[in-house]
């Protein structure tokens, strides 16, 4: 098990390094750079060349990358060319927003999916099952930006509880924090619930077809015990895996909801970094998100392994 | 099969409450709107963050909007284009227009408590000569600076400059304290009537009243900018009172204009949106082709389609609000038949295909571009539209000139010469008039000191652009603001900024 973890962490480090190189390479290949954007439409070509030189943008990309790595060794992530603020500070400022969004939406989505998913598998073809399949269709097809706007106009504008925009930090007011994060989390949860529900339902159906369930039924065990204790337990692995990966994806993928609800999260930071060719900022955020995704999928694998001894053995052999 | 149909029906039923909402009126005029009586906090919604808070080192309007209230220039232009004293109480321009002497106020303190002197003014204007100052080229002519005493300073130019005073009225020609320049980008220290408190990028920015301001503290005690990237969210916020001030586009005015709690301010932008053309292109270097295009473009349709009629069509490259403006719309009016004839005369009776590069971050310009593409189709000119990011536009179009046509507006200057000088064949600008036909007028304008003669030259220039069409001028847009109806004193200045100094709630 330990060996397995070390191997995974080792490969995680390599992934992060490769991603950081690719980020640098990609940004050096697209048109436009931070100096052009800073000078705007009044600069002369000579002035632009002078500023590019000053900012080190006239160097080949691998030298720029090397300079950046040199800073990184001293734990200096560089500062944003656009905002002038330290990259690490900017990322840390955004964490509460993005983590709360990811956490709350996963909690909502998991609760609904497990309850409805289990029922619809048990009563396959029943009314709950039909409603669930409608939710699956809707959840995955309703665009998030539209739902967000609908929520703002029909819920936030008409209720004094939910603010229409902005993030309230939990240290400022906990109720305010919950209110500011609730609607955007709900939008994300609705989008995630479709596929989550499907994972639970499929997994549960499979689990209910196992011999030991039939055996338990034959033995006359109470229904809830069959479904919850034996059925659901056997069906947990796949949905939890999906949930973990979804959570990781949410860390960098909530840009649209963040924009509509004016939340200062990681997604918008990445977006502005790309648009403004802010290489240090992009590098910092890309590395952070990659590292989180890798670590979360590692954590998910370990948890699944702990839950199922068979998988743990397989993991060690590979 | 039956089940699948049932699933579909239920999916539709679940959607119903949402679509049902759509049929209700989208606004609920002022039902829950309460006007606060002793309101002193101004909540402003901004679409984008400032690009750092050092106005001398950026070209972003979003920065100037904030920093105009923190920093001050020597003089300012009010909304009617009159010069007003600010940090300078008085000034004299030499008769030969080769120097200007400012008498400074002696009661001005920076936010860090230190008194402002002529030394700071010298330092600040010299700072505009640095390579990372986007406006460097406009200050090249100022070659010397003499400090007469602590509160008197003279700037000297290399060649006569009849509009020298305007150089000291821009949002970037502000006075900054030498000891703070390294951190101005994140922690601005100026002399203005608002002090910087804090800024969390992509979230908010706070200013507070400067109690020691030489002109008395402002009536607004705190300004809270909130970064709201989504226009719909900002509109909802202005309706429920979360925001007091927001810039809006023509179409979003419709649902709020009848709301009693909201008032609308509109002002002609000091800029001209144009169809920019690369005169090195084999088709576009032909004057007749350009005239054909100008005749085939229906500007009224563009203004109605893209900004709900909020805009003034123009026939030449000068904003309709400028003093020297003349109406040249009749020189090249919309005339499809004439356009077809001109195109045939140019040797392209069957039309041609041409690239149109549009900056996708600016919805107004991409919308204008799409309407133009549609209109040019009628004379068989096929536009191949390419949507690019702003950084790509700056590189390909502005810097490398690898483009055929584009739509853009360059924001205004306080003097017509600075505004039109990009048409000089040697300016290296993306829309410079490469054949040199504008050079003579521009050269005369640069040295002519007589005001009436200058106006005549600028008008001559407008006729030239209207006739020879190095760009197709489209419109001077209207800038629209929606605000809390109790907010008074709002005005937009020719520099495209607003002074919160004069704002108050009634």
Image (cartoon, coloured by chain):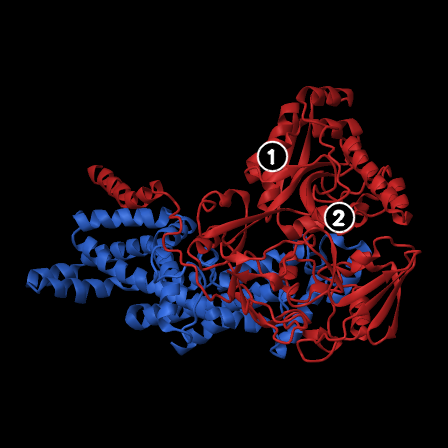
Chain colours: A blue, B red
Element under disc 1: helix
Crowding near the residue tagged with mark 2, few <14, some 14–19, many ≥20 C-alpha atoms within 10 Å: few
Q: Chain of mark 1?
A: B
Mark 2 lies on residue? B400
Among the two numbered marks 1 and 2 on one chain, the one whose residue lies closer to the N terminus: 1
Q: Is residue B415 visible?
A: yes
Crowding near the residue tagged with mark 1, few <14, some 14–19, many ≥20 C-alpha atoms within 10 Å: many
Element under disc 2: loop
Q: Where, quadrant-wise, is the N terminus of chain B in this rendering?
A: top left
Q: Chain of mark 2?
A: B
- Residues A313 and B82: in front is B82
Q: How far is the residue under mark 1 from the one under mark 2?
A: 29 Å
Mark nearest the camera among 1 and 2 is 1
- Percent across and percent down for residue B428 are 81, 48
Q: Quadrant of residue A246?
A: bottom left
User: In the rendered view, would you say B506 is above or below A7?
Assistant: above
User: In the rendered view, would you say A54 is above or below B406?
Assistant: below
Q: Quadrant of residue A172?
A: bottom left
User: Is A160 positioned to the left or the right of B421 in the image?
Assistant: left
User: Is B60 positioned to the left or the right of B259 in the image?
Assistant: right
User: Is B233 positioned to the left or the right of A59 in the image?
Assistant: left
- Percent across and percent down for residue B199 are 57, 69
Image mark count: 2
Mark 1 lies on residue? B302
- Percent across and percent down for residue B463 are 80, 34
Q: Is residue A25 visible?
A: no
- Residues A77 and A258: in front is A258
**Tags 1 and 2 on a common chain:** yes
User: Is B483 positioned to the left or the right of B277 in the image?
Assistant: left
User: In the rendered view, would you say A97 is above or below B231?
Assistant: below
- Percent across and percent down for residue A168 are 43, 68
Q: Are marks 1 and 2 in contact (CB under 8 Å)?
A: no
């Amino acid at each position: 098990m330990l060996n397995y973890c070390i191997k995974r962490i080792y490969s995680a480090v390599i992934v992060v390094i490769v991603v950081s190189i690719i980020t640098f390479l990609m940004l050096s290949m697209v048109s436009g750079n931070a100096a052009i954007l800073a000078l705007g439409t009044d600069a002369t070509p000579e002035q632009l060349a002078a500023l590019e030189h000053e900012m080190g943008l006239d160097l080949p990309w691998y030298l720029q990358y090397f300079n950046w790595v040199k800073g990184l060794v001293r734990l200096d992530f560089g500062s944003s060319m656009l905002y002038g603020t330290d990259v690490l500070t900017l990322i840390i400022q955004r964490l509460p927003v993005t983590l709360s969004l990811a956490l709350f939406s996963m909690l909502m989505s998991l609760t609904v999916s497990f309850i409805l998913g289990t029922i619809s598998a048990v009563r396959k073809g029943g009314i709950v099952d039909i409603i669930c399949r409608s939710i699956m269709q809707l959840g995955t097809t309703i665009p998030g930006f539209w739902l967000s706007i609908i929520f703002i106009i029909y819920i936030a504008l008409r209720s004094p509880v939910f603010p229409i925009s902005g993030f309230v930090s939990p240290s400022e007011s906990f109720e305010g924090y919950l209110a500011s994060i609730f609607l955007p989390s709900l939008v994300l949860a609705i989008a995630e619930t479709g596929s989550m529900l499907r994972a639970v339902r499929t997994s549960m159906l499979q689990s209910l077809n196992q011999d030991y369930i039939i055996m338990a039924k034959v033995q006359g065990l109470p229904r809830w015990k069959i479904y919850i204790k034996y059925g659901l337990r056997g069906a947990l692995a796949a949905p939890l895996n999906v949930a973990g990966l979804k959570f990781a994806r949410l860390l960098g993928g909530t840009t649209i909801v963040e924009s509509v609800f004016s939340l200062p999260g990681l997604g918008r930071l990445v977006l502005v970094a790309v648009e403004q060719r802010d290489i240090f900022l992009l590098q910092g955020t890309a590395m952070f998100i990659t590292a989180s995704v890798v670590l979360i999928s590692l954590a998910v694998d370990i948890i699944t392994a702990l839950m199922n001894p068979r998988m743990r053995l397989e993991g060690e052999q590979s | 099969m039956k089940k699948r149909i049932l699933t579909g029906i239920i999916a539709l039923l679940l959607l119903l409450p949402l679509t049902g909402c759509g049929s209700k009126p989208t606004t609920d005029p002022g039902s829950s709107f309460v006007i606060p009586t002793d309101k002193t906090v101004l909540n402003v919604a901004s679409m984008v963050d400032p690009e750092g808070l050092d106005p001398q080192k950026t070209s972003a309007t979003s920065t100037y909007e904030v920093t105009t209230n923190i920093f001050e220039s020597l003089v300012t232009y009010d909304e009617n284009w009159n010069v007003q004293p600010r940090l300078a109480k008085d000034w004299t321009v030499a008769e030969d227009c080769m120097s200007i002497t400012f008498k400074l106020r002696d009661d001005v303190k920076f936010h860090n408590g230190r008194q402002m002197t002529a030394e700071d003014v010298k330092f600040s204007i010299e700072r505009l000569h640095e390579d990372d100052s986007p406006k460097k080229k406009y200050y090249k002519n100022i070659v010397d600076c003499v400090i007469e005493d602590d509160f008197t300073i003279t700037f000297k130019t290399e060649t006569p400059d009849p509009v020298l005073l305007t150089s000291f009225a821009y949002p970037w020609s502000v006075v900054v304290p030498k000891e703070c320049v390294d951190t101005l980008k994140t922690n601005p220290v100026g002399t203005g009537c608002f002090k910087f408190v804090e800024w969390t990028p992509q979230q908010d920015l706070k200013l507070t009243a400067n109690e020691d301001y030489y002109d008395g503290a402002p009536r607004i005690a705190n300004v809270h900018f909130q970064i709201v990237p989504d226009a719909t969210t900002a509109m909802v916020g202005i309706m429920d009172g979360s925001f007091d001030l927001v810039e809006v586009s023509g179409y979003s005015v419709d649902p709020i204009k009848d709301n009693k709690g909201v008032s609308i301010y509109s002002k002609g932008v000091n800029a001209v949106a144009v169809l920019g053309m690369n005169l090195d292109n084999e088709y576009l270097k032909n004057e007749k082709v350009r005239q054909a295009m100008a005749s085939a473009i229906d500007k009224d349709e563009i203004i109605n389609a893209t900004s709900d009629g909020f805009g003034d069509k123009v026939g030449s490259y000068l904003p309709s609000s400028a003093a020297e403006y003349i109406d040249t719309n009749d020189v090249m009016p919309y005339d499809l038949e004439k356009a077809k004839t001109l195109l045939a005369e140019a040797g392209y009776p069957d039309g041609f295909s041409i690239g149109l590069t549009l900056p996708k971050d600016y919805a107004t310009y991409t919308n204008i571009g799409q309407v133009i593409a549609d209109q040019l189709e009628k004379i068989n000119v096929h536009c191949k539209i390419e949507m690019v990011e702003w950084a790509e536009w700056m590189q390909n179009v502005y810097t490398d000139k690898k483009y055929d046509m584009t739509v853009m507006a360059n924001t205004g200057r306080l003097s017509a010469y600075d505004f039109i000088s990009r048409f000089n064949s040697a300016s290296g600008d993306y829309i410079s008039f490469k054949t040199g036909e504008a050079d003579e007028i521009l050269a005369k304008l640069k040295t002519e000191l007589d005001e009436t003669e200058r106006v005549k030259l600028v008008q001559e220039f407008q006729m030239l652009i209207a006739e020879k069409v190095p760009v197709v001028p489209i419109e001077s847009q209207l800038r629209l603001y929606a605000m809390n109806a109790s907010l008074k004193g709002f005005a937009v200045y020719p520099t495209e900024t607003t002074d919160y100094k004069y704002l108050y709630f009634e």
